[in-house]
Image (tube, coloured by chain):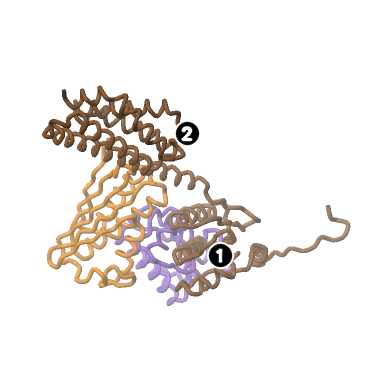
């Protein structure tokens, strides 16, 4: 009896025992699966391995693992969980080999080689697909994040406000600068107020980017006012070797920034006369 | 695949620099780069092309569309058989120039692109490879 | 291809179009120097609205034009830099001083004409 035949004959036992071991591992996601479903999945896995032993690593094999991993990742399995399943299955398959061919050690060695090869190949496939799926997710998330672009708010004639929220990395900073410059041109803005109240950390890179934003704005004929630097942040910035304040006007908060901006274009806010209030 | 994936521009004088710029602008535009990235790439190539004309006299710009499986990108190889760069570290410093330029060519180009590598040996010439990926 | 230098009121106006070759940039610098000394304007306005790329060479020529004019007692206002060009210049590490949008540039020159 050959290897594939032996595996096929014992498929029910293999499926049953691996499913049972998996159930006892206490992996939450596996606990949620019905035993019969899990057993069915294991049966399917063995079936694929048998096919791969017969016909080698072909397109069907690759596609099977592609679909399987895509599915498992979307369910939330980690690569560890997936590898654990393969380890348990491998151990069970080796048990079966040992039992069925106990009197033919040369066959055990031969089949063991085939088996480890095919399981190794499966694992490589799985890891590869896993990486691909994850990378795609990351790219999608990045795109989603890009779409949540920073709004450029026209606050008053010739004044725009850019409220920055969250971590500003170099890529995001570059996008913000692009948006900002386009807004300066399209809205004929003379003053740009950048509000960093919502930025948790300003490191050298972010400071450099803010500086670049200010310089680029100046090339378009606008002035930058930076507002909302927290006391902690101020302490950090002075330790960084960035000459931020020579290039940008800074104000404590948006309110002060608005007053400065209005002052620069010759306007101020005054109380209305009595009786004219709405 | 689309056509026009590879272009080679021979550089001898400053009109060729303009031609190189236009070629790279067209390719980056057709690939779907935004206006700002087009400008970054075009400016970077202008710097590399000028370095060739200025220091080596002649050389070429070879550009092609690349794909790393996840993203498309543009790759530009600027090569010449000129005198080579004596001290690459120095040449990569802002403000360093042996001509009457601003000394921002190489370090600036590096900042404009995503990837930058330079190889130069005295008497044999210089090769610069830059890449920018489509986001 | 020579870049035209127009005289409007007491000002010289240069509008650069398209891709500027190194020779054309240097030619512009030379003809501006000549025109400034011959026509004695109060200011020079260089408009870059139609310029798609300014690399370090062109930036240097613009800077040279500016300091050369100052030596001859004339202010230069550069206007109309495109957003992409502005970002690229900053990333290249080039700072050009005294740059404005076209409207402001005209206002400034008007004021100095009076």
Which residue is outermost to the front? Answer: A103
Quadrant where the N terminus of chain A is found in the figure: top left
Residue C45 showing in the rendered view: no
Which residue is outermost to the right? Answer: A275
Drawn colour of chain C? Answer: purple
Measured along the vertical axis of the image, is residue A80 above or below residue B79?
A: above
Query: What residue is shown with label 1?
Result: A223
Residue A147 showing in the rendered view: yes
Drawn colour of chain A? Answer: brown
Q: Nearer the viewer, residue B121 or A252?
A: A252
Query: What residue is shown with label 2?
Result: A32
Tag 1 secondary structure? strand
- Residue at 40% across / 73% down in the picture? C68
Drawn colour of chain B? Answer: orange
**Label 2 Cα crowd, 10 Å radius (few <14 / some 14-19 / many 20+):** few
User: What is the x, y in percent for residue A227?
Assistant: 60, 65
The answer for how far apart the CA atoms under marks 2 and 1 are is 59 Å
């Amino acid at each position: 009896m050959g290897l594939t035949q032996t595996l096929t004959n014992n498929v029910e036992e293999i499926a049953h025992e691996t499913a049972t071991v998996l159930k006892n591992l206490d992996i939450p996601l596996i606990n949620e699966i019905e035993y019969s479903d899990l057993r069915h999945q294991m049966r399917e896995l063995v079936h694929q391995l048998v096919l791969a032993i017969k016909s080698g690593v072909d397109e069907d094999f690759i596609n099977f693992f592609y679909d399987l991993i895509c599915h498992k990742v979307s369910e939330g399995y980690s690569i560890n969980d997936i590898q654990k399943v393969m380890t348990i299955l491998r151990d069970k398959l080796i048990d079966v080999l040992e039992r069925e061919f106990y009197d033919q050690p040369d066959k055990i060695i031969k089949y063991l080689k085939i088996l480890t090869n095919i399981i190794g190949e499966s694992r490589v496939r799985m890891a590869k697909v896993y990486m691909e799926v994850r990378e795609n997710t990351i790219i999608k998330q990045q795109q989603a994040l890009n779409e949540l672009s920073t709004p450029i708010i026209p606050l008053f004639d010739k004044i725009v406000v850019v409220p920055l929220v969250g971590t500003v990395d170099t890529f995001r900073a570059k996008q913000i600068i692009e948006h900002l410059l386009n807004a300066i041109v399209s809205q004929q803005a003379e003053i740009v107020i950048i509000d960093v109240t919502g930025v948790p950390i300003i490191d050298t890179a972010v400071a450099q980017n803010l500086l670049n934003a200010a310089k680029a704005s100046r090339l378009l004929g606008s002035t930058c006012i930076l507002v909302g630097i927290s006391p902690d942040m101020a302490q950090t910035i002075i330790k960084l070797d960035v000459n931020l304040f020579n290039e940008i006007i800074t104000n404590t908060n948006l309110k002060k920034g608005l007053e400065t901006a209005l002052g620069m274009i010759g306007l101020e806010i005054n109380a209305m006369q009595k009786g004219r209030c709405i | 695949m689309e056509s026009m994936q590879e272009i080679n521009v021979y550089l001898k004088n400053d009109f060729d620099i303009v031609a190189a710029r236009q070629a790279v602008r067209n390719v980056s535009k057709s690939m779907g780069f935004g206006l700002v990235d087009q400008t970054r790439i075009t400016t970077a190539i202008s710097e590399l092309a000028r370095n060739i004309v200025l220091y080596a006299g002649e050389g070429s710009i070879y550009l092609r569309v690349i794909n790393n499986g996840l993203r498309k990108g543009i790759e530009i190889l600027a090569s010449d058989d000129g005198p080579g760069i004596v001290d690459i570290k120095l040449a990569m410093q802002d403000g360093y120039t042996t001509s009457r330029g601003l000394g921002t060519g190489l370090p600036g180009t590096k900042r404009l692109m995503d990837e930058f590598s330079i190889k130069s040996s005295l008497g044999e010439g210089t090769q610069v490879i830059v890449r920018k990926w489509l986001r | 291809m020579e870049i035209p230098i127009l005289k409007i009121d007491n000002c010289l106006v240069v509008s650069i179009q398209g891709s500027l070759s190194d020779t054309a940039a240097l030619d512009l610098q030379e003809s501006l120097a000549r025109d400034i000394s011959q026509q004695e304007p109060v200011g020079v306005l260089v408009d870059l609205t139609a310029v798609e790329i300014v690399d370090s060479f062109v930036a240097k020529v613009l800077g040279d034009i500016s300091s050369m004019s100052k030596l001859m007692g004339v202010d230069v206002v550069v206007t109309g830099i495109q957003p992409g060009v502005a970002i690229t210049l900053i990333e290249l590490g080039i700072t050009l001083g005294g740059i404005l949008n076209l409207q402001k540039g005209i206002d400034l020159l008007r004021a100095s004409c009076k």
